[in-house]
Amino acid sequence: MYTPPAFREDDPDLLRAQIAESRLALLATNGPDGIPLVTPLPLLLDGPDHLLGHLARANPHAKALPATARALVLFQGPEAYISPSFYESKKEHGRVVPTWNYEAITAECDVETFDDPDRLRDAVTRLTTRHEAARPDPWAVSDAPPEFTAAQLRGIIGIRLAITRLSGKRKLSQNRPEADRAGVTAGLSASPDPRDQAVASAMAGMQTR
């Protein structure tokens, strides 16, 4: 991931916190024909240096994973289009162009696959607990009939990814003058789109660090 120095985020605690809050990641590995295999899937931060998840056994990506030593995982944070009209400098000289603000993390990983039923059940249970936690009446794996759950587990393979390198990028107008950054924050805050508002919040948080 191309990351100019102004946008680099190296704080491992912050990166892990963002990963822990992520909902859907992109898992990418080299395919047997040279074309990357990519699968969107939820991943759970398992301790400080591992990611845990599973794929459908019928997925060609799952079939290729046992022969794959390395993977790249992308966690995409909030993102927003930045209009030149947000910039104070547009009024001064007009030499401004559109861009995009966003947060993203890449994790380079060593790949382990597994199909032990107990490990699969644990992975599925932990992922479910994490994503059901905010619901008023959380669903649990134990709510399903045991024979049904056992059959479902036979249809997936588990993956545990050992993180060997984390790279963070927070492109939040750090390269712009203060007045332009304020204009972007105000413009995004006024947007009805919650994605724009999330970037405005990230920019405001960056200014308080």
Image (cartoon, grey):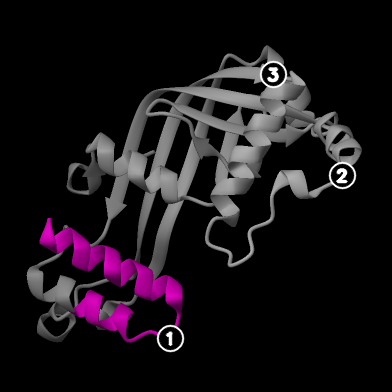
Q: Say which residue label 3 marks.
A: 114
For the point 30% across and 81% down, which residue is it? 189
Discs 2, 3 touching: Cβ within 8 Å: no
Q: Say which residue label 1 marks.
A: 192
Q: Say which residue label 2 marks.
A: 145
Left or right of 138 in this view: 72: left
Sequence-wise, which precedes: disc 3 or disc 1? 3
Residues packed near mark 2 inside 10 Å, few (<14), some (14 to 19) or many (20 plus): few
For the point 28% across and 77% down, which residue is it? 84
| CA distance for labels 3 and 1 | 44 Å
Q: Position of residue 117 (x, y in %)?
A: 76, 23
Residues packed near mark 3 inside 10 Å, few (<14), some (14 to 19) or many (20 plus): some
> Which of the 4 image quarters holds residue 190?
bottom left
Q: Is residue 163 visible?
A: yes
Sequence-wise, which precedes: disc 2 or disc 3? 3
Left or right of 54 in this view: 80: left
- The answer to whether residue 206 is magenta is yes
Amino acid type at image mark 2:
Pro
Indicate the secondary structure of the residue bearing disc 1. loop
Depth check, mark 2 against mark 1: the one in front is: 2
Magenta stretch, main secondary structure, is helix
Q: Quadrant of the N terminus?
A: top left
Residue nearest the observer in this picture, 33 or 65: 65
Q: Is residue 41 visible?
A: no
Tell me where the magenta segment starts and ends, as one range. Answer: 183-209
